[in-house]
Amino acid sequence: MKKTILLTSFLVVLFANVYAQENQIEYKPRPINAEFYENSGDTLVISLRTPEALSTTFESKLPYPILFVHGLNSSSETWNTSFNYFNNQYFWQFGGRFDFCLNADNNNATANLNFFPTPNADIAAFETTVQDGDYYTINFNVNPNGTIGNNALSNQSAIFKQGIAVKKAVERILQLTGKNKVIIVGHSMGGLAARQYIQNAENWQQPTNYHHVTKLVTLGTPHGGSNASDSGLGWFAGIQTRSEAIRDLKTTYYYSGDQGRFLFGGIEINNSTNMNEHLTGDDFYNYDVNCNGIIGEHVIGLNQKTIDNFVDYACVIGRITGGTTDGVVSEPSSNLNHYYPTLNFPAKLYYFNSTFDFIENHTELPGYPYQIMQGLDEPNVKELAYEIETNTVYNGFTTVQNPVATDDDFFKFTIENSVEATVTINDITTSSMNASILNSTGITIGTTQNNIGNTITFSQTLAPGNYFLKISSINPTTSNYQIPYQFNLTTTLSNASNEISNLNFYPNPVKNMLYFDNFSTTKASVYSITGQLLEIKNFETATNQIDLQTLAKGIYLLVLENETEKKSIKIVKE
């Protein structure tokens, strides 16, 4: 049923593995336990977030894994408040952290995009504990020796370097999860790091030549720059005003008044009319914006570059009491639509309005799961729909949208044979939800089905082709996001035959032992008719029989797998 999806996934993973082997990062050695602890001061030791051991049956219920990217002078620990919520509320599994030092040669005067062990390389990756998971973090708060800290201004380094590191993190996530796309959430400068990856083809994965980002959520990201971090507030926070990051984040330079080179382009030169930031002394450690070792080039600004119109963009914008700024980034700088007004699907905007902050709430944004979940809400148009597989349970989220009253969620799936498709949605928290299956052009097949209590169930006969599942929550409330709805789309052959591509199985109904002709399996997954995974049976050697005597009476879906095939059958247990 899912040969096209499975083949596509297999090829994506194969390409990712081949490419990774050809471009394998060599990790730089570091002290034992540097991955797990941060030394702050002489005596204070801070434990860092690391993955918990996975159960052998872990299977993410999210369509895609999420990568969180922190901002200027920060670290992956900035997300901990929201991560604790996600773990406790949704039981999300942390997949791990990717540590990079972006000034590994500890030389502020020069810049390059080389990785260790190239001599004098600016970028060094350090080995961490990573595994299949729901979400991951990237961490630039790393010293040249791999200890956690910012002695070398790594988390204040050039955004060109950050984009390269994001690329490597995405590659590794694709390998770990077997998925072909990721979602990125970036706070402040982290959103620009994600855009640097997305908008520059030289950063894309080969041989697929694609950036693999399906959604970008930015929290307080200065898409148009910010001049606030080199103020007294920035100095107090330990920000180095001569750093590469401050150079790249500038909307305009203070004394010369010209636009920031990284965002708006121009010549990499420092004089009275170009990139002039300070009245006396050096303005920045270096002026090599594109980090290629050549000074004086004309660089193309990030906001001058094309942007993918088929990424689902969302911007979370902070507002302190009585203002249109979060204290660090003002509107419209935090609104991507201001710089890309012709997006096919404009970025969705969500606001955090303080009633108690008068200085800034910019640094608080990573700790607000409500606004993050609004940004993470599934695409509301079919053109951006998340790809899902049949016979798999997923979580979806109902959130308050802006400015519409209905939360539409779109998912795309492929059918290979004529099937009877059953949609089941459970744990509905909004008072009114409906669902429908659309054909490849967006026309509803059959009728739209409404919820009865907290459940929707309906079936539809489908011919081979591409389809969309549209789930609409009417007038959601601000608490609906706390409980995800669960949905799946189970499929069985519509001709009800016991023969599926030369697979014969009998007896059906079955009492104890189920037998197969022309097929052997090494793994059998047993699902209820509503799509709940009940049991996984693994076999050391391929077999053509399965003992089902422990199953209760009822109708079940069996997904049978071997090294080359995956088949789904419906059986009746008597």
Image (tube, helix red, strand yellow):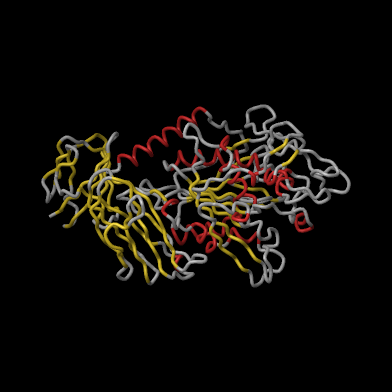
Is 478 in front, or is 300?
A: 300
Q: Position of residue 240 (x, y in %)?
A: 76, 48
In the image, residue 401 sits, relative to residue 93, either above or below, namely: below
- The residue under the point 44% across, 48% down is 64
Is 144 in front, or is 295?
A: 295
Please give left or right for residue 347 compared with residue 471 in the image. right
In the image, residue 106 sits, relative to residue 385, either above or below, namely: above
- The residue under the point 29% across, 34% down is 563
Q: Quadrant of the N terminus?
A: top left
Corner quadrant of residue 140? top right
Q: Quadrant of the C terminus?
A: bottom left
Q: Position of residue 457 (x, y in %)?
A: 27, 62
In the image, residue 404 sits, relative to residue 505, either above or below, namely: below
In the image, residue 57 sits, relative to residue 399, either above or below, namely: above
Q: Position of residue 198 (x, y in %)?
A: 56, 43
- The residue under the point 76% across, 33% down is 295
Is 322 in front, or is 503?
A: 322
